[in-house]
Image (cartoon, grey):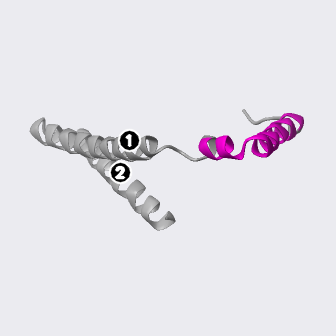
Amino acid sequence: MALADREQRELEEIEQHLHDEDPELAAKLTRPSVITLLFGGALRALGVLAAFFGGLLVVVLGVTWSSTPVVVAGALVCLGVFLKLLVQARQG
């Protein structure tokens, strides 16, 4: 839910006051920690790998069961992961 204009202004005033009072603390609060950067990227990568291999598992199960809809569902999951990675690579 978005903040009202009044609330947004108040929040910006509080933030500016913090920057004026203690710039060092404000800098620490606004930049992410090294741990957050490392684990955030690792968790994201593990999630992508899990989704991709989950899709592959569904494809294999579909082939084993001779079920076309299951194979298609697994292929769509794998394709979705690939397309998501492609879009993220193009954005930055």
* Mark 1: secondary structure: helix
Which residue is the extreme one toward the right?
6
Residue occupying the point 27% across, 40% down = 50
**Residue 34 locus on image (x, y percent):** 44, 46
The answer to which of 4 and 26 lies nearer the viewer is 26
Q: Quadrant of residue 44?
A: top left
**Residue 70 locus on image (x, y percent):** 24, 39
Q: Is residue 42 magenta?
A: no
Q: Amino acid at mark 1?
A: Phe
Label count reads 2
The answer to which of 61 and 35 lies nearer the viewer is 35
Q: Quadrant of residue 17?
A: top right
Residue that carries the numbered disc 2 in the rendered image: 81
Of labels 2 and 1, earlier in sequence is 1
**Crowd around label 1: few <14 · some 14–19 · many ≥20 (10 Å):** few
The answer to which of 63 and 83 lies nearer the viewer is 83
Residue occupying the point 21% across, 39% down = 58
- In the displayed structure, does residue 29 sit left or right of residue 41? right
**Residue 73 locus on image (x, y percent):** 30, 42
Asked if labels 1 and 2 touch by Cβ distance under 8 angstroms, the answer is no
- In the displayed structure, does residue 5 sit left or right of residue 19? right
**Crowd around label 2: few <14 · some 14–19 · many ≥20 (10 Å):** some
- The secondary structure that dominates the magenta segment is helix
Q: Is residue 82 above or below residue 51?
A: below
Q: Amino acid at mark 2?
A: Val
Q: Which residues are magenta?
A: 6-28
* Mark 2: secondary structure: helix
Residue that carries the numbered disc 1 in the rendered image: 39
**Residue 35 locus on image (x, y percent):** 42, 41
